[in-house]
Amino acid sequence: MHRPTPKALALAAAPLGAAALALLVTLGTAPAFAADYARVDVLGFSADGSRFAFEEYGTQDGSGFPYSNIYLFDVDRDAWLGGSPFRRLDETGDATPEQAEADLARTRAANRDEAGDLISSAAISGHGDTVAHNPPTERGADPHRMIASTRAEVPEFGPQVELRLTEHAVERPARCPDGFGEIKGFRLTLAIEGETRVLNDDARLPQSRGCALGYRIERLVLHHPVNGGPASFAVIVLVEQVGFEGPDGRHLAITGRL
């Protein structure tokens, strides 16, 4: 299979550049389904629940290059920490599957080193529990609804949290090509103990989202600070977006306190 040059590719999880979009259109509007769905490694919360981090990683479609993206959040502001995210894409040559995995491991390790000082200063220390998980391979669950108890201990599992996601069409950004379907935003709500709040409701598509085609709730991570107070949460959402060989899967997180 012909591999495009690096200049024809956008960075993983970043908006597609004009050259890459032109190449996509040249190749046709019915892409082959050899998609690249990033994997997720939750780095967890700080002990006080004020910081959260996760990594997404994989092998980029089209190029076969390994990548790693590390995101650190200020939980209460639901915003990236200064200096985050850390994105790394290594332009490696053709490789056997074993070599490709080794290349990916080196890319991830190098990105962890790059992010290490901020991870340390944010006191990210692996706290938190994944209380619900709905990966893209799951076929028996609703990708737009997730219900979970707030604690992983028995017999008291705590109150239930319900997440609901709805998609809606948004204005197509100039960077996004025609022929791949509607460009979509999403609305996400969280309900607990009779109260519902809106966590996200897109009026337009952020540039960091690329050219989004659809969404699913991927997982809910909770942390109960050891000193008490409200639990911290991170909702990780999988974003299907226009890629080189088909829809790619990347992730975003929405954070806050219960």
Image (cartoon, rainbow, N blue to C red):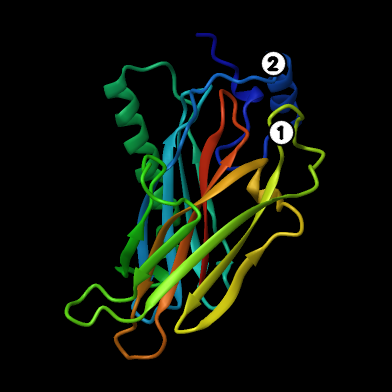
Which residue is found at the position 17% from the left and 80% from the top? 155
Tell me how far mark 2 sits from mark 1, CA to CA. Answer: 17 Å
Q: Is residue 150 left or right of residue 84?
A: left
Q: Is residue 81 above or below residue 173?
A: below
Residue occupying the point 39% across, 50% down: 141
What amino acid is labelled 1 in the image? Answer: Gly
The numbered dot on residue 78 is: none
Q: Residue at x 34, y 91 (%)?
A: 228
Picture coordinates of residue 172 (x, y %)? 79, 42
Q: Amino acid under label 2?
A: Gly
Mark sitting on residue 28: 2
Image coordinates of residue 197 in percent, x first then y, are 58, 77
Secondary element type, mark 2? loop
Return the residue at label 1. Answer: 17
Q: Mark 2 Cα within 10 Å, few/some/many (few <14, many 20+)?
A: few
Helix, strand or loop under label 1:
loop
The mark that comes first in sequence, 2 or 1, is 1
Residue that extends furthest to the left in the rendered view of this protein: 154
Measuring from the top left, give residue 121's x and y in whole percent: 42, 71
Answer with the quarter of the image where residue 97 lies. Answer: top left
